[in-house]
Amino acid sequence: MTVPLGLPSRLPPDSLGRPLRDLRISVTDRCNFRCVYCMPKEVFGRDYAFLPKNEILTFEEIARVARVAVAHGVEKIRLTGGEPLLRRGIEELVAALAELRTSEGRPVDVALTTNGSALAVKARALKDAGLSRVSVSLDSLDPERFAAMNDVDFPVAKVLRGIDTAREAGLDPVKVNMVVKRGTNDADVLPMARHFKGTGVIVRFIEFMDVGSTNGWRMDEVLPSAEVVARIDAELPLEPAAPSYRGETAARWRYRDGGGEIGVISSVTAAFCRTCTRARLSTDGKLFTCLFAERGQDLRAVLRDPSRTDADLAATLGGIWAAREDRYSELRATLKDRRAGRIEMSYIGG
Ligand code: SAM
Ligand code: SF4
Ligand code: SF4
C-alpha cells in the first residue's frame, strides 16, 4: 500500500479505522533504575548488551521522522525510554520538536515520561526548551519499598523533589504514574492518593502489564483498576469524569469534594485498543504499531539512505500504518500462548 506523495496530508487510517495521532519516541534503551517489572537485574545486568552508539538514531534523524509524522496527522509526541533524561542534550531535541506545527498550524504537544531522578536538575531547561508536560513514574512513597522497586536504592525524596521542581517550572499538570503490583506495592495506593490529593498532581494507577518477556508477569499480580477505584473511593469519595479527549488511555475519576482527580489505566482488565492511535519509534529506529508487537519495521534504513526523501519516508510510514491490525490487549485472554518474543518496554518505551 502506498500513500499519495507531495503535499502534507493525513495518512489513511489503519485496518481497524484508527488514525495515527500519537508518536512515542524512545531516545535511549538505558536506564539508571532496574524496576523489577521492567528491567529486572537478572536480565539487565552488567553484561547486558545495550545498543551501540551507531545504531541509535541521532536527534536529526528523530526530528526528521517526527516532522514527517506531524505533517501527516501526528499531534502528540512523547519522549520516553529507557530513561530519556539520560540522553545527553535531550533539551535540544525537545526544542526541535516543539517547533513543529500540525498541518492545521497548531503546535505539537511534546511530553516526556521519566523516572524523575534527574528532574530536579533538568525541569527548568526542559520547560524553557518547549516541553509541554511531564509524567513521572513513582511506585511508592515508602522509602524502603520504593528503593526495592527501583532496585538501585534510589531515594524517593529525590523524585518528590523532581516533581516539585517540575511544578515550579510550570510543567503543569504533572502526572504521576504508579504501576500497581498486587502483593508488592498495592498497599501504597491509598497513601499515594492521599499524598497528592489537592496538590494539582494527577496520579494514574497503571495495571501491571505483560510487556516484554522478562518480568515474570502473572495475572494474579494485577490489581484490577476497579479495585483501585473502590479502595480510594471508600476513604476519599470519587465520581467518574468524562474523558478529556477521544482515545485517552486513562479513565478519569474526580474527588467529590473538589480535591482534584486521579486516573486508572486498565490495559489488562478493560482494553482500549479500539481507540489506540499510537505508534512507537524505538531507539534504533524501528517503528512498532503496538506495545506488544514482536517486530518493528526498520525506518533507520530509509533515514540513512541518501537517495530516500521525506516523501519516501511518509510513504513507508503510511504503508506500515495502513497494514496495522494490532489489538493485543483485547485478544490477551483468548491467546493460547502469549507471544514469547515481545520486545521489552525499556527498549520500545512505555
Ligand atoms: N524510565 C521512564 C519512566 O520510568 O517513566 C520512561 C520509560 S518507562 C518504560 C515508561 C512507563 O512504563 C513507566 O511509567 C513505567 O512504570 C511503565 N511500565 C514499565 N513496565 C511496565 C509494566 N510491566 N506494566 C505496566 N507499566 C509498566
Ligand atoms: Fe527504567 Fe522506567 Fe523501566 Fe523503571 S520503568 S526500569 S525507570 S525504563
Ligand atoms: Fe494499542 Fe497494542 Fe496497547 Fe491495544 S495492546 S492499546 S493496540 S498498544
Image: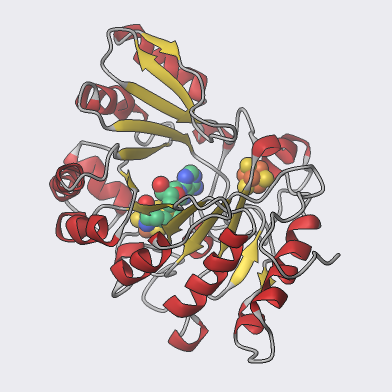
Which image quarter: residue 239? top left
Position above or below: 309 against 175: below
Position above or below: 107 against 238: below
Q: Where residue 48 sits in the image (x, y, percent)?
A: 44, 76
* Ligand 2 visible in quadrant: bottom left
> Where the N terminus falls, by quadrant?
bottom right
Q: Nearer the viewer, residue 20 or 39?
A: 20
Q: Residue at x 46, y 66 (%)?
A: 43
Q: Where residue 124 sits in the image (x, y, percent)?
A: 18, 56
Position above or below: 287 against 166: below
Name the side, left or right, on which 79 lies relative to 321: left
Q: Where residue 170 sits in the image (x, y, percent)?
A: 21, 44
Which image quarter: residue 31? bottom left
Total tally of numbered discs in the picture: 0
Evaluate whether residue 343 shows in this view.
Answer: no
Q: Residue at x 48, y 71 (%)?
A: 63
Q: Tell me which colouring the rendered structure shows.
A: secondary structure
Q: Residue at x 27, y 48 (%)?
A: 148
Name the side, left or right, on which 231 lies relative to 101: left
Evaluate whether residue 122 shows in this view.
Answer: yes
Which image quarter: residue 334? top right
Q: Nearer the viewer, residue 41 or 325?
A: 325
Q: Residue at x 63, y 92 (%)?
A: 306
Q: Where residue 179 sits in the image (x, y, percent)?
A: 41, 39
Q: Residue furthest bottom?
A: 306
Name the side, left or right, on which 69 lies relative to 254: right
Q: Nearer the viewer, residue 207 or 348?
A: 348
